[in-house]
Image: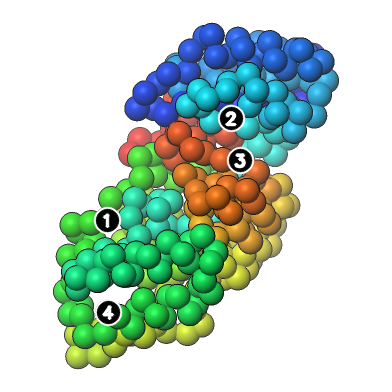
Amino acid sequence: MTMANVLTLIASPETADLTDQLVKRACDSLRQAGAIVQDIRWLAPKIAVDIPFNGIAPNIAQQQAGIALGNAPIDFFAQPVADRQKKLLVADMDSTIIQVECIDELADFAGLKEKVAKITEAAMRGELDFAEALQERVALLAGMDVSVLEKAFTERVVLMPGAIEMVKTMNKMGAKTVLVSGGFTFFTNRVARQTGFHINRANTLNIENDQLTGTVGHPIVDANTKLHSLEEFRQAQGLQINQTLAVGDGANDIPMIKAAGLGVAYHAKPAAAEAADAQINHGDLTALLYLQGYHQDDFAIA
């Protein structure tokens, strides 16, 4: 019998604590709700498993998995098998593909990190207008020497675990990969090169006499830019909505997360998590590959 749906359980690769007992609990919970569960498929030992099923809707399976797993540090998502492997990825950068917020790190070199980070946090929670918050923070950097940008990138920017594997695997499988950030092109250009993104978009820091002017170029890359980029590349690739994937962590990622065929909140703020189809709270970025049914043997090498 062909299974129309699949429930995927994912643990952090660092802990690899997806046990047979947890998988059995999830399977039993689906059966109790009326599902027909077929042979499971391990995508990575003790890290990720697919549980194919019929007979109940994915949202019911999602609820059952949550009950079965309780407080176990396991991410899980139920979905139809059809169009599971996506052909377009649009990703946020700061706190998604990299582990820091670049503007906060720049501010640290000016002794202003605490002040700027508070504004960043409020903006990411959706409490402030993004463009106004961006301009307010950049204004505080006026007069900073451009050499600090390279210093910040070299000393502070660290990729999220799984970032290179995730992007390069999707490239290998024929997907278009796009990095769209409310941050700055200085960083997205370099991160895109490191990870393999085909396209990157972000804001431009205005510079005069090798110093930041405290302003950004217009139009500002914001939530609408991310949403429009998803639609632009979807149409350019001739794709249906359900063939697209968007991932982010903050309020300005919500429109693209909601518009994508699969919207993923990655270690996200509450508003973004609420808007997403799937939440990754424990796994690294390879979780996005497991959600698409890729086996770890399919991964491109970082």
Q: Earlier in the sequence, mark 4 or mark 3?
A: 4
Question: What residue does disc 3 label?
Answer: 278
Circle 3 SS class: strand
Is the Cβ of the residue at disc 1 closer than 8 Å to that at disc 4?
A: no
Give the number of marks: 4
Q: State the colouring used for the structure image.
A: rainbow
Point 65% across, 23% down: residue: 67
Q: First in sequence, mark 1 or 3: give its number.
A: 1
Q: Residue at x 33, y 83 (%)?
A: 139
Q: Which residue is mark 4?
A: 141
Please determine whether, in this image, residue 42 is positioned above or below residue 271.
Answer: above
Task: Say whether disc 2 or disc 3 marks the residue closer to the N-terminus.
Answer: 2
Q: Is residue 61 left or right of residue 13?
A: right
User: Which element is circle 4 on?
Assistant: loop
Residue 196 at least partly seen: no
**Is 176 in front, or is 251?**
251
Compared to 161, does 29 lie above or below?
above
Badge 4 amino acid: Leu
* Residue 298 position in % (x across, y down): 47, 29
Label 2 sits on a secondary structure element that is: strand
User: Label 4 vs label 2: CA separation?
Assistant: 41 Å
Q: Earlier in the sequence, mark 1 or mark 2?
A: 2
Mark closer to the chain start, 1 or 4: 4
Identify residue for label 2: 76
Q: Which residue is mark 1?
A: 157
